[in-house]
Image (spheres, grey):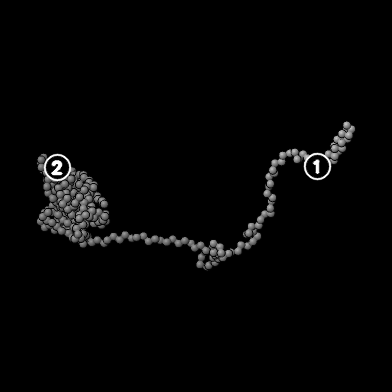
Amino acid sequence: MKVKEFFLFILCLFLIGNPWFIAFSSAENIIQFPSLDLPSQSPTPILPFQNQTPQPTITGIFPTMSPPIPTQTGPLIPTPQVVQTPQPVEIKPQIAWGKFNTYKEFGTGDKLLLGLDVDYPLNWKAQADVYNRIITFNEDPSGLVSFLVLPAWQGSWMDGYDFFNYISQGLYQKFTNLSLLNQESGSVPNQAIGVYPTYYKADLQGFIQEREMFIHVEVAVLRIEVTATSNLSYAGSVICYSPREVYQEKFQNYFGRMIRSVAKSMETIPTQNKQGG
């Protein structure tokens, strides 16, 4: 027993004098987790362009360009110059106008034609059909651009629309597939008792030899109530037409002025401009 106690005493002294042995023995009985291996800090690398002067290379993607040299003519970036784009100038045709004296040209002494003067281009052909009481102005021999005047017809038409239906028979003979596009009708203020001035306007479409045409018609009728059952009417009309694609041009250059001259003479057709196309 004493020997056993002696060995225990000696063992305690040994352990007290060697603490690293205790740590080592304890470490062998503890589960060790793998430690996180942090990357070691390496010296900061020197980039190629640090502390160095960049040198241009011939093999680069962009060629080396020398800076521009200032000149005495102006700054490096020139002041932008405002360039004036020339605008097309619309040149209107020079038109020589004349007056067609209906009373003189008809030569019948009809007093109803007095004062009816029609403005028309002098290079157009004017022709008076006295028998049918029609004046025709043609731009050229083709007759595709034409202006017609029907002056001072006498009958018993009730109003402008009634007279239009009467003359439309001739339109159906001249144009194929004739169709009505627009129409307008009304009366002209008048203080005379038993006198009824009316007007009618129409835009139509038709064809001449498969050529699409635009037709404009204006009618004025002065109806006089003679008795309760009978009337006496005086009517006049203008008809102008051309191929549809040039009608606006023809109206602005020719038809508009020609219509106004007739309206001024007849005084019953409103002087409003009428355009179509």
Left or right for 169, reference 92 = left
The one nearer the camera, 169 or 222, is 169
State the SS at label 1.
Answer: helix
Image position, residue 261 (x, y; %): 21, 54
Q: Is residue 50 above or below residue 220?
A: below
Residue extending farthest to the top is: 1
Residue 20, given in percent of the width and then of the height, sits at 80, 42
Disc 1 residue type?
Trp
Q: Which mark is residue 226?
A: none
Distance, label 1 to label 2, CA atoms, is: 145 Å
Mark 2 lies on a secondary structure that is loop
Q: Nearer the viewer, mark 1 or mark 2?
A: 1
Which of marks 2 and 1 precedes in the sequence? 1
Disc 1: CA contacts within 10 A as few (<14), some (14-19) or many (>=20) = few
Residue 117 placed where, x, y %?
18, 56
Who is closer to the viewer here, 27 or 71?
27
Residue at left offset 39%, top offset 60%: 85
Q: Position of residue 147 (x, y in %)?
A: 19, 55
Front residue of 71 and 48: 48
Q: Quadrant of residue 28?
A: top right
- Residue of label 2: 194
**Residue found at x 11% / y 47%:** 155
Residue 20 is tagged as 1
Q: Residue at the location (16% across, 46% down)?
A: 165
